[in-house]
Amino acid sequence: MIKRLVQKVSTLFSRSLARPARVRREPKRIPVAEHGIDRNRVPRNAVRVCETLQKAGHRAYIVGGAVRDLLLGVTPKDFDVATDATPEQVKSHFRRAIIIGRRFRLVHVMFGSETIEVSTFRALDNPERQTDEHGRVLADNLFGAQHEDAARRDFTINALYYDPLTETVLDYHDGVKDLRRKRLRIIGDPETRYREDPVRMLRAVRFAAKLGFQIDEATREPIRRMAPLIENVPAARLFDEMLKLLTSGHSVACIMRLRAEGLHHGLLPLLDVILEQPAGERFVMLALSRTDERVQTGKHIAPGFLFATLLWHEVLKRWKEREARGEHRIPALDAAIDDVLEAQTEKLAIQRRYTSDMREIWMLQPRFERRTGRAPFKLLEHLRLRAGYDFLVLRCAAEEAPAELGEWWTGFMHATDAEREQLVAAAHASGVPGAGARRRRRRGRGGGAARTAAPQ
Ligand code: ATP
Ligand code: MG
C-alpha cells in the first residue's frame, strides 16, 4: 500500500518535472564565437540549398542530427535542411529535386551522388492529425512555424537550427546547454511524446549510448512502463530503427541500455533471443563488438551478416530439435531457418534482401565441415564464401565451432593449389567428416579457377 503510494507520488513528481516548458517562440541565438562550429565542415551543397532558399525569401537552416554532431565535433552522417518553403516551392528552386514520403512529405535535392533532404516546418497541434487508438501519429502534413517545428522534434539536442550564412545557431529548448551537460532530454511531456511515437524510446537509448549521455530522469522514468507500446509500431519501421541502433558503432552499449530500461523484454523477439539465451549471448556480444569496431573504423557493415549472427543460436536450437525428431541434417537446417525467419519478421520485418543473405550464410555452415574430396574446392567458388567464412570464424572465436575447423579453412583459402591438395589429404587421413560424401560426387574442377575466390 505504502509502496504504491510512494510510487504514485514519485510518478506525479516526475510528471510535473516533465511538464513541457511553455513553447518558446523566440529562440536563443547563439553566435559562432560561442558555439564554435567550423563552417568549412558543412558540405558545399548543404550551404547551397540554404542559400538558394534564403535568397528566394525563405528561411532555411541545417537541422537535427547534423547540428548536434557539428557541436560535438563529430562528423555528421548526413545533412538535413528545414525551411518555411512548401515542398512544391523547394522543388521549384532546384534542377534535380523530387518530393517523397507520405506520412511526412519531404524534398530530396540531388547533386551528383549527394542528396540533401529538405523538410518544411511542421505544425504542432494539428487537429487534422490522424492517430491510432493508442495515440500514435499516423499521418501529419500540416505546415507550421519554426518554433512549432522545434517543439515537435524528439530531443532538445536534436532541435537545433544552424544558419550556415550567418553562422548562428537557433536554440528553442536549451539544447546547447543539454549538449554541454551531456543530458538527453525529451521535448514536452515524455508520456505524450512516447505515446505519439513509441520509437522515441528506442531513440533515447540509441542517442544516450552513442553519445555517452545520461538520460534525464523525467525522460527515462516512463520508458519501462510504456515499453509495451513498441508492439504497435509497424514491423518495417522497427527494423529501420533497430538497424540504426545496431550499426551506430555503439551497439553493445545500446543493447545494455535496452536491457537496463526493460525495452528488450517480450517486445523484440530478436532481442529476447540475444539476451535470454546464455549460449547465444557470448556469440552475439562478440559479433556486436566486432561490428562496433568496424563502424568506428569506417568499414562497411552488411546488415544480412549482422542479423545472421543475432539469430544464429535460435536457428541452432531449432535445427537440433528437428534433427532429434529424425529429420535429415540439411533439410532440417533449411526448415529451422524458415521457422526463425517467420517468427522474427512478424514483429520486426527484416527486408527480403537481407534474409536471403542470412539464409545463404547459415546454409554454408554445414558445408564447411566437409573437408575432403572436391567439396572444399567447390565451396571456394561460392559467391557468398567470404561472408560464410567470416561467420565461421566468429563461431570459432565464440567456441561454438571447433577452432581447428576455422584454422583449417583460413589455411585452405590462402593456400596454393598444391597446398590445398595436401590439406585435403591430411583432413582425409585424420578422418574428418565428409570423406564418404565426396565419393558420390564427380571429380574434376579444382583449384585453378577456384583460387580467384580466395581473399586477397
Ligand atoms: P543520426 O545521426 O542517427 O541520423 P539524427 O538526429 O539525424 O541522428 P534522424 O533519424 O536522421 O536522426 O532524424 C533527423 C531529425 O528528425 C532528428 O534530429 C529529430 O530532430 C527529428 N526526428 C527524427 N525522428 C523523430 C521522431 N521519432 N520524433 C520526433 N522527431 C524526430
Ligand atoms: Mg540523421
Image (spheres, grey):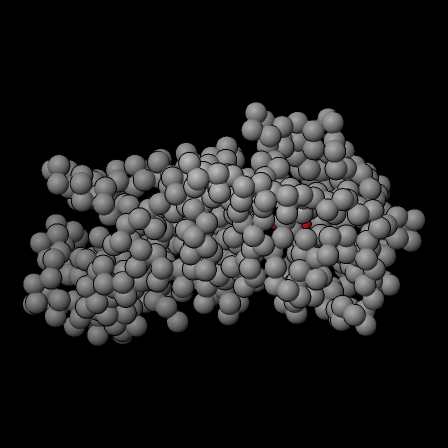
Say which quarter of the image contains residue 356. top left
Residue at the (39%, 71%) spot, across then down: 456
Residue at the (27%, 69%) spot, across then down: 410
Say which quarter of the image contains residue 365. bottom left
Who is closer to the viewer here, 332 or 234? 234
The reply, left or right, for residue 390 in relation to residue 193 is left
Residue at the (42%, 36%) spot, across then down: 1
| Spot occupied by residue 181 in the image (x, y as percentages of width and height) | 64, 64
The reply, left or right, for residue 372 in relation to residue 245 is left
Q: Is residue 228 above or below residue 433?
A: above
- Residue 281 visible, this orientation: yes
| Spot occupied by residue 49 in the image (x, y as percentages of width and height) | 80, 54
The reply, left or right, for residue 201 in relation to residue 165 is left
User: How many numbered circles does the render carry?
Assistant: 0
Q: Is residue 390 above or below residue 54?
A: below
- Residue 163 visible, this orientation: no
| Spot occupied by residue 185 in the image (x, y as percentages of width and height) | 63, 53
| Spot occupied by residue 40 in the image (x, y as percentages of width and height) | 76, 70
Who is closer to the viewer here, 15 or 299? 15
Who is closer to the viewer here, 232 or 164? 232
Say which quarter of the image contains residue 16. top right
The reply, left or right, for residue 266 in relation to residue 444 is right
